[in-house]
Image: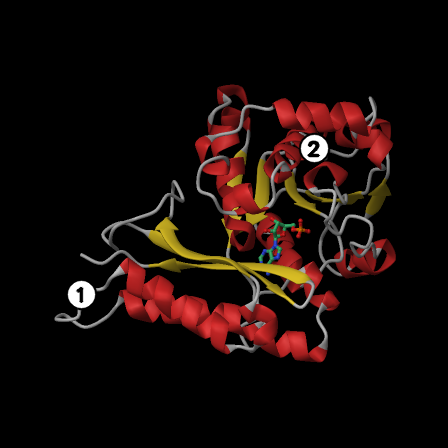
């Protein structure tokens, strides 16, 4: 496994070592089993696998955790060395944004994003500017790596939909690149794995279980009995009740707990089409997100 830190070496390796048309897994590091599952999906394509590790400053708001985001490159490389990864690309901020961060922030803000990243009032509303930064860095990484497949987790569902839409909107890219969805990997008790889970105190860690429990309650509400027609408002109420019951930390800080169209992420009136339950909540000082598919009901 090669560790590459600049785009010149990356370009050379692509040509010299047959890394062209690779399977690509972009990450911000602090890797866990969720990331490893993406790497395994990439390996399963039979292509050489490239993993990027880059904590992207343009997708963090001014009061977010960019400064304290865990940076664990040595441990990440150790984890990846146990998998069949051809190269780890861990560029500096200057490498990704050679014209400087202010210019990058302006560029991120000026990008025309698809509706799914602008109107649902989910991450788009809670983290203004976030998706501009995501679209900017993913586009830059795609340009540098030029992969054949790129693997993203459903854990960040609105981000996944953004990347699917951006790729679809660019026919040249869509012809060269397949965006592959990977399911959310959870701890045994249901908590979705996240690099931010390491911020949780023992008490927060228990409260955090409310997110996956609330999503399960929404799925149960959606399959209510024949006479008890499933109802989106009831599913959303069930989520809020569980989140509120989980203790004062989470009680104060539900950002959203909603059921949405699984494609547009817009509100739905019923469960006749594929829907997705999505939650963002602050547990202590840690912001967590999670989501779950809800099967359509006819
Ligand atoms: P991050 O390093 O948090 O930016 O995530 C990098 C990629 O890993 C994204 O595509 C995430 O959606 C994905 N990911 C993060 N957590 C999980 C998880 N628990 N299960 C599956 N994929 C995940």
Find residue 138 and name its label. none
Dot 2, how many residues are within 10 Å of its Cα: few (below 14), some (14-19), or many (20+)? some
Q: On screen, 120 above or below 39?
A: above
Compared with 236, 47 (above or below) is: above
Residue 98's quadrant in the figure? top right
* Closer to the eye: label 2 or 1: 1
Query: Residue shown at 41%/67% (left/top)?
Result: 239
Asked if residue 59 lies left or right of residue 112, the reply is right
Ligand 1 within 8 Å, label 2 CB: no
Quadrant, the C terminus = bottom left
Query: From what the image shows, is residue 198 above or below residue 23?
Result: below
Q: Is residue 129 visible?
A: yes
State the residue at coordinates (18%, 73%): 225
Label 2, label 1: how many angstroms apart (C-alpha)?
46 Å
**Image point 83% across, 35% down: which residue?**
93
Residue highlighted by disc 1 = 229
35 vs 154, left or right, is right
Give the side of residue 117 with respect to residue 101, left or right. left
Under tag 1, what secondary structure? loop
Tell me the element at label 2: helix
Q: Is residue 45 in sight in this rendering?
A: no
- Relative to the observer, which residue lies in front, 237 or 59? 237
Mark 1: few, some, or many residues within 10 Å (few <14, many ≥20)? few
Residue 210 drawn above or below residue 30: below
Q: Where is residue 267 in the image (x, y as percent from the top left)?
A: 34, 47
Expressed as whole percent of the image width and height from the top left, the position of residue 53 reads 76, 46
Residue 141's label in the rendered image is: 2
Q: Based on the displayed image, in which of its 4 quarters is residue 99 positioned?
A: top right
């Amino acid at each position: 496994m090669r560790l590459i830190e600049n785009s010149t070496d990356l370009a050379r390796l692509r040509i010299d070592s047959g890394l062209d048309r690779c399977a690509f897994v972009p990450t911000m590091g602090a890797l866990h089993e969720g990331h490893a599952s993406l790497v395994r999906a990439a390996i399963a394509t039979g292509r050489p696998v490239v993993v990027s590790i880059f904590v992207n400053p343009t997708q963090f708001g001014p009061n977010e955790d960019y400064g304290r985001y865990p940076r664990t490159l040595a441990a990440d490389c150790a984890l990846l060395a146990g998998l069949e990864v051809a190269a780890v690309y861990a560029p500096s901020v200057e490498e990704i944004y050679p014209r400087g961060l202010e210019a990058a922030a302006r560029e991120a803000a000026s990008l025309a994003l698809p509706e799914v990243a602008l109107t649902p009032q989910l991450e788009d509303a809670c983290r203004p500017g976030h998706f501009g930064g995501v679209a900017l860095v993913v586009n830059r990484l795609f340009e540098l790596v030029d992969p054949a497949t790129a693997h993203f987790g459903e854990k960040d569902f609105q981000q996944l939909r953004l990347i699917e839409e951006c790729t679809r909107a660019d026919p040249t890219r869509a012809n060269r690149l397949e965006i592959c969805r990977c399911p959310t990997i959870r701890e045994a008790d249901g908590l979705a794995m996240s690099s931010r889970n390491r911020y949780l105190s023992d008490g927060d860690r228990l409260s955090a279980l409310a997110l996956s429990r609330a999503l399960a309650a929404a799925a149960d509400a959606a399959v209510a009995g024949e006479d008890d027609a499933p109802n989106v408002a009831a599913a959303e109420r069930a989520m809020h009740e569980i989140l509120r019951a989980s203790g004062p930390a989470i009680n104060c800080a539900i950002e959203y707990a909603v059921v949405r169209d699984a494609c547009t992420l817009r509100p739905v009136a019923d469960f006749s089409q594929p829907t997705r339950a999505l939650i963002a909540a602050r547990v202590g000082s840690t912001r967590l997100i999670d989501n779950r598919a809800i099967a359509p009901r006819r």
